[in-house]
Amino acid sequence: MKRFFKALGKYFADFGTAVSKGDIWVKLSLFIMGMGYIGRGQVIKGLLVTALEAGFALFTIKISWPYITKLSTLGTVQREEVFDPLTMSKTVNDYDNSLLILLMGVLGIVIIAAFIFIYIANIKAAFRTMLLKKEGKHLNNFREDLRELVNDKFHITLLSLPALGVVFMCILPIIFMVCIAFTNYDAAHQPPSQLFSWVGWKNFITLFANKQGSTFGYAFAKILIWTLIWAALATVTTYIGGILLAMLINHQDTKLKKMWRTLFVITIAIPQFVTLLLISKMFGNYGIVNGILQRMHIISFLQNLGWISTSYVPFMTSSGLTHVMIILINIWVGVPYQMLIATGILMNIPSDQLESARIDGANKFQIFWKITMPYMLFITGPSLVTSFIGNINNFNVIYLLTGDFVTSDGSLAAANAKDVDLLITWLFKITSESVTKQYYMASVIGIIVFIICATLTLVTYSRMIKGDNEEVFQ
Amino acid sequence: MKKKLVAVLMTAAMAASLAACGAKTETPAQNTDNTVTEQTTGDKTEEQTGTDVVINQGSDDAIANLVAATEGTVDLTLWCSELESYQNTMKELAEEFKTTYPDVDFNITIGAQSESTCKDEILKDVEAAADVFVFADDQLNELVQAGALQAVTTTYTFDPIVANGAGAVNAASLNGVCYAYPLTASNGYFLIYDKSLLSEEDVSSWENLVAACEAQGKKCGMDFANGWYLYGFFSGAGNVATLAEDGVNNVCDWNNESGLAVAQAVTNLCASDAVISIGDADARAQAKDGDLIAYVDGTWAIEDFTAAYGDNLACVKLPTFNVNGAPVQQGSFAGYKLVGVNSYSDNIGWSMLLAEFITNEAAQLKIGTNTQEGPANINAASQISSPALSALGAQSAYADLQRVGGSYWTPAGTLGQTLYEGTDDVQKALDDAVAGILAPQ
């Protein structure tokens, strides 16, 4: 932290020195950015930089500034229209579009920030050129500058495009989405016909506080708990299952090893959503499994026991049973991946370790728990964390399996949630399947999911790489 | 306050149009039997004195003006159901529309967009949505609220109020302003059954139906876990679930004494193994297997059930059910398909003319014949008859317009599921559901 502030201080100090100690050309480049270069004969570079400045000024003044000024209110003029039945045309007032204001406002501010960064760097560069000239050193002409970009400064050439992409494809949308969480953007405030506005932290309070008439707090707690249970169980079961399956296939007594492996890989080759939809139909209330159970009179047996009141086993429609089914089905879908990974690693376990353990008289379970598992965990630790995070956001499995599920919990229903929803499917339902379309709540949930995932990742990774684990393993 | 301003502007526009047309055409103010509960989109002070819908008749001059003012190609996009029969019929109609105005060069694109989800697609980006679209009438409120619908204050080729049934016009109107052109009047549900196995007596009440199914070892069903169907039981007994005056929240009294009796009746009904709660797709499969011999569904399912029952397919209004020992007629939702004009359309005039063209009598007759749906147009409807449409007609006396807010669906579906599975505490299930339905938005 201290180092950061020191660096920040130096950054601005350098800028101050450049301005105060710079000659007339450096000072002129405060206003016309290219002057620092033109004064030293680097005309093309100077013109390019000036063109950049002009482009920025034009964009900001002409396009983004009107939006930035409205950013504080997100617009005040609502759309009004008058239809003229004689000409069959209509006149519309000059209305504000809150969504555009927010989008262009954020874009404008990001561009201004980027420009300030370039501006400061430019002054410093002009100052450096001045010093070079004073010392009588060689100044690059434009051609030499270009050549440098593919030689000494090749990293800049390579990284500039990805960096721009990150800013416009990741950072900008994220800022935009985070902003939505602080507005009242929903179906009743839908641009362009309606305006939406800032509401502060209200939506976060709605999510955490259980107020009268709002069940978001209740739904959030319930769904968060299930999300974490699901992520933990889904990760652990497929992981252990994958290792066991791989060991079974690798066992010396197993015949036709390649065939077994191929069969399990085929389950990966079939698109996941096809498998999931098919399974959800199979276990449906009137699906094939219930049909078989009925014809075997198991249904009537269970009814006599008083375990079920319906004429089917509600595999996919009752809370509890569905939770268990989802995890079981996920084992089927997820184990083959883990088996492939585990197969590769198992083959690489140093055989001297296994041999010496055997000579020392360790039995198979001891070898598994003391050598195989620690080795596996050490190698696959990071991917385990990734798959845990992946499961928190495992939209497909939950959404495709639980299409028929109807919650019997009124409080969940009021918040557009179901017992088996993960945070991510809940978010989807709020934005896409509910009528009220509370985009702001979806955004709040999105932020929370990000915080959970980021914290978990940071904590586990930093613990994993702490100390010299390479030796710990030995 | 903005809404008020809009309202004033709207009124001004209407007044202006009245004045403009008054000279040429006598404007008969057609009164329709407006039985819809009055809803306002927001500002409660905005008192609507008359709920009668008025549509002015524009002159032919206006069309001539429009033709004269049009330059270049007019691009129009029309969204309608993805069903092949619909797509083909609309293509034909679009061609006819082009020949009606030979002086103008049209480029009409027809997109496939299910009426039931039309609203979602339009509200995603209303400026990029189709100029003219077909949608189900329950989406009217939200589309009006989002300002996506061009109000139908003037029509140029025919008067939708005279041509269509009063129910359809009501469904297309809000606060005395018509917002869409009625297209079909068959978005409702009724009982489909196999008449070789069930007599008319059997399908007159749920009790008889269940007894007949039990006797034959067959099933009868409905999608109980769906608020759209469940509504009928409660509305039949006089319970209410509808929009509040603000047009967003709900009013619901299902947890009162009469609601409790209804819920008890539904639970009793579902206690029989012969009654199953089953969705559309599963039902069709079971009907083909021969297990399901009676099911509550709409016109869109007729084709599949014909495949299952063959010539024995019959349709009838919904059965009665016993509440406290007395038979009560099951109610239902009545739905309409409407054609709306996007108020953000670049060619608003031509969009309105196209919407008129595909909803006039000839077009509705064509659509009705090709798609099995019942036209909203009175004359066209009288020329089409089918078992499904007559069942709908018989049910229409007990049907309500579908006007419920967004928070209705999930809790109502949950209630249906609970009642079907059976519960010890029906009152609590009802209280939970009503709390959810009333949850403020």
Image: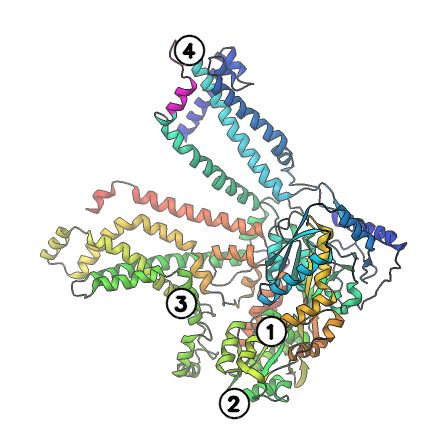
* Callouts 1 and 4 on one subunit: no
Image depth: mark 1 or mark 3 in front:
3
The residue drawn where x is 40% and y is 79% is A293
Which residue does the numbered mark 3 point to in the structure image?
A325
Which residue does the numbered mark 2 point to in the structure image?
B216
* Residue type, mark 4 in image: Lys
* Residue type, mark 1 in image: Gln
* Residue type, mark 3 in image: Met
Q: Is residue A145 above or below residue B118?
A: above
Image depth: mark 1 or mark 2 in front:
2
Q: The magenta stretch spans which residues?
A: A130-148
Quarter of the image holding residue B181? Answer: bottom right
Q: Position of residue B282 (x, y in %)?
A: 50, 74
- Where residue A59 is drawn, which disc sits there? none
Mark earlier in primary sequence (3, 4) = 4
Q: Residues within 10 Å of mark 4 (few under 14, many from 20)?
A: few
Q: Position of residue B144 (x, y in %)?
A: 70, 56
Is B299 a magenta residue?
Answer: no
* Callouts 4 and 2 on one subunit: no
In three-dimensional space, the C-alpha distance between marks 1 and 4, rounded to whole angstroms, equals 89 Å
Nearer the observer, A123 or A436: A123
Quarter of the image holding residue B190? Answer: bottom right
Considering the numbered disc 3 on the image, is that residue within a helix, a strand or a loop? helix
The residue drawn where x is 37% and y is 45% is A459
Q: In the picture, which quadrant includes the N terminus of chain A?
A: top left
Considering the numbered disc 2 on the image, is that residue within a helix, a strand or a loop? helix
The residue sitting at the bottom extreme is B215
Which residue does the numbered mark 1 point to in the structure image?
B427
Which residue does the numbered mark 4 point to in the structure image?
A133
